[in-house]
Amino acid sequence: MAVTRTFSIIKPDATRRNLTGAVTKMLEEAGLRVVASKRIHMTREQAEGFYAVHSERPFFGELCDFMTSGPVVVQVLEGEDAVKRNRDVMGATNPANADEGTIRKTLAESIEANTVHGSDSDENAKIEIDYFFKPEEIVG
Ligand code: ADP
Ligand code: MG
């Protein structure tokens, strides 16, 4: 299995509850390595651009409100089959449907305030990493 990269966000519900370390520990225990990390407060423009694929969905406005409601931690994660590995440890979008032991089952508050973002394909991982990081900020 190839070592690849994915993009992660620790969302405002998690930073507000001081769970940055708890989330990162679960990522690391799942075999992912944090090779870039920064705490930022997303602008409205950044959030709308990042979630542009969801712009027609009814929750788009609220999602952008939520993602700009407090700081987030954007990260690049590296590991074997990183996209799938991260999606597996994240759990389902709705924490009520997430498997036991996943980040969302353990920590998420709701379908919106669901603690973490993770890229859904290698192609989107590259786009999302490039959206937030310069190459020199990633140190593997
Ligand atoms: P995922 O984050 O699991 O890839 P999506 O890409 O479908 O899920 O949705 C992006 C984000 O939008 C979710 O993580 C969640 O924060 C929010 N979201 C998704 N569905 C809903 C919904 N029905 N109501 C409110 N927020 C939602
Ligand atoms: Mg998604």
Image (cartoon, grey):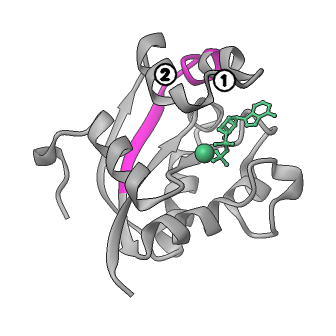
Residue identifier under label 1: 63
Above/below status of 10 relative to 4: above
Q: Where is residue 65 in the image (x, y as percent from the top left)?
A: 63, 14
Disc 2 marks which amino acid? Ala
Taking the image in four quarters, ligand 2 sits in the one at: top right
The quadrant of the rendering that contains the C terminus is: bottom left
Which residue is rendered at x = 46% and y = 69% of the image? 28
In the displayed structure image, the side of residue 22 where residue 79 appears, left or right: left
In this picture, which residue range is highlighted in magenta? Answer: 65-76
Q: Residues within 10 Å of mark 1 (few under 14, many from 20)?
A: some
Label 2–label 1 contact, CB within 8 A: yes
In the displayed structure image, the side of residue 48 where residue 97 appears, left or right: right
Above/below status of 11 relative to 1: above
The quadrant of the rendering that contains the N terminus is: bottom left
Residue identifier under label 2: 47
Disc 1 marks which amino acid? Leu
**Mark 2: which secondary structure?**
helix
**Mark 1: which secondary structure?**
helix
Q: In which quarter of the image is residue 79?
A: bottom left
Pointer 2 or 1: first along the chain: 2
Q: Where is residue 122 in the image (x, y as percent from the top left)?
A: 41, 60
